[in-house]
Amino acid sequence: MTPEELQKELNRCLGCKVKPCEKACPLSVSPHDFIALAKSGDYTSAAADIAKNNPLPQTCGLVCPDRFCQAACIRKKIDTAIEIPCLQAKIMQKGGLPTLQLPEQNNKRACIIGGGPAGLGALFEFLLQGWSVDIYEKENNLGGAARLIPPYRLPSEVLNAEIQRLTSNERVNVYLNQTITDFEPLRQKYDAVVAALGEPKRRSLGILGEEQSLDYRRYLSTPDAYHYKKVAVVGGGEVALDCAITLKKQGAEVVEMFVRRRQEDMRIMARDFADLAQHQVVIRALSSITEIRANDNLYDLTVVRNRINEQGKAEALPDTLCKQGGYDKVIMALGSYFPKEDLPKDVSCAGDMNGNCGTIVQAIASGRFAARHCIEQTSTNNKTVSNA
């Protein structure tokens, strides 16, 4: 976005008093307010206005989908909605990350298990309320699922800077390469415990030969380790999109996305379809793989055509099975989940493990909510004790 394009997009904002964009943001960031500041040329204040509610402000600007603030933009009734996430990212780039202002420290200490977006959201909330925090993360760095987003969408230096802003103070201790399975000792040690464990289980099709496929998380975490000519990507969401584009950037000649539903049902943005077209990714909509079979170091697929029935569900069309072959690899990119039966008891859970957070901004909001709930509970318990 050039300076001219930035100013033109800022000037399209109508400054409507009802602020539907703010209401649509899971973190209650107000595009109305930060756009007004940016219009005046005060990018520093505009960036600070964004960062006061969002601990990963430029990250969200870069990767947020168009179904929150942008979908609520009144401007679309005139022509097209304002590209609010793009504006947010550009404003943060120009205005810079503000220093994290912390209130007076109290004597409360929280424990967060998991350093992904939800855990970082919880950390942000605890810090804003004067708490000290210990974070336990099973990987060798913080960031969680955000680390799987390819650098062409989210440069690592952006995420690293935002995480460092949250953790580089004496109130935060970070313990990496720590897997927590027993929560009871933590509940005894800390005033509050928030679990933000992500989604460890990948979704599967349950088809013959699926074990021969590559998990999207393994691919996206180290894409340089894999080089293919022809690949089938199973899925139609953002992780499938990231796999497909990254494969093409890595030199794959043919990348085909197998999508169970219609192309218009894919949970990606309009500009993502343009990226797929630009990179010549083939979208095989209304197609389901029913079998993966190895054939001389390559893979053959059995595929069935689908239709959308009267209930709005995809169902296989009879007599449409066909064979497609010659793939170097099949990548499963159907997303992940946290098993409900494994949810820890008597612990506040946040993010993807709750099953209702499909985006970074939703995960952050969930983490902030979980921390706020813990703080309120602690306050209520203290009042009960003092009144006894």
Image (spheres, rainbow, N blue to C red):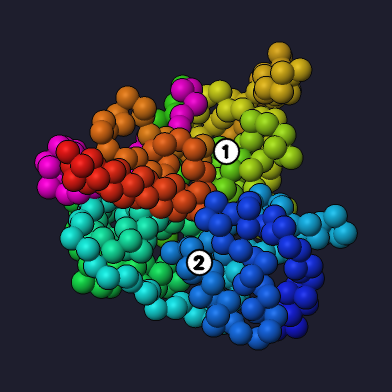
> Could you tell me which residue is drawn at 52 percent across and 44 percent down?
358
Q: Which residue is mark 2?
A: 57
Identify the magenta region.
179-207
Kindly indicate whether the residue at mark 2 contacts the one at mark 1 (C-beta within 8 angstroms).
no
Badge 1 crowding class, 10 Å Cα cut-off, few under 14, some 14 to 19, many 20 or more, is many
Q: Is residue 220 above or below residue 166?
A: above
Q: Is residue 277 above or below residue 235?
A: below
Task: Residue type at mark 2: give it.
Answer: Pro
Q: Which structural element holds mark 1? A: loop
The quarter holding residue 380 reads top left
Q: Is residue 89 visible?
A: yes
Q: Which structural element holds mark 2? A: helix
> Could you tell me which residue is drawn at 59 percent across and 82 percent down?
43
Q: Is residue 366 magenta?
A: no
How far from the left and from the top, in percent, is residue 93?
54, 78
How far from the left and from the top, in percent, is residue 218?
39, 48
In whole angstroms, how far apart are the C-alphas of marks 1 and 2?
28 Å
Q: Is residue 8 left or right of residue 156?
A: right
Task: Residue type at mark 1: give it.
Answer: Gly
Quadrant placement of the N terminus: bottom right
Quadrant placement of the C terminus: top left
The quarter holding residue 81 reads bottom right
How far from the left and from the top, in percent, is residue 80?
82, 59
Task: Tell which of 387 and 363 is nearer to you.
Answer: 387
Q: Which residue is mark 1?
A: 235
Q: Is residue 246 left or right of residue 322?
A: left
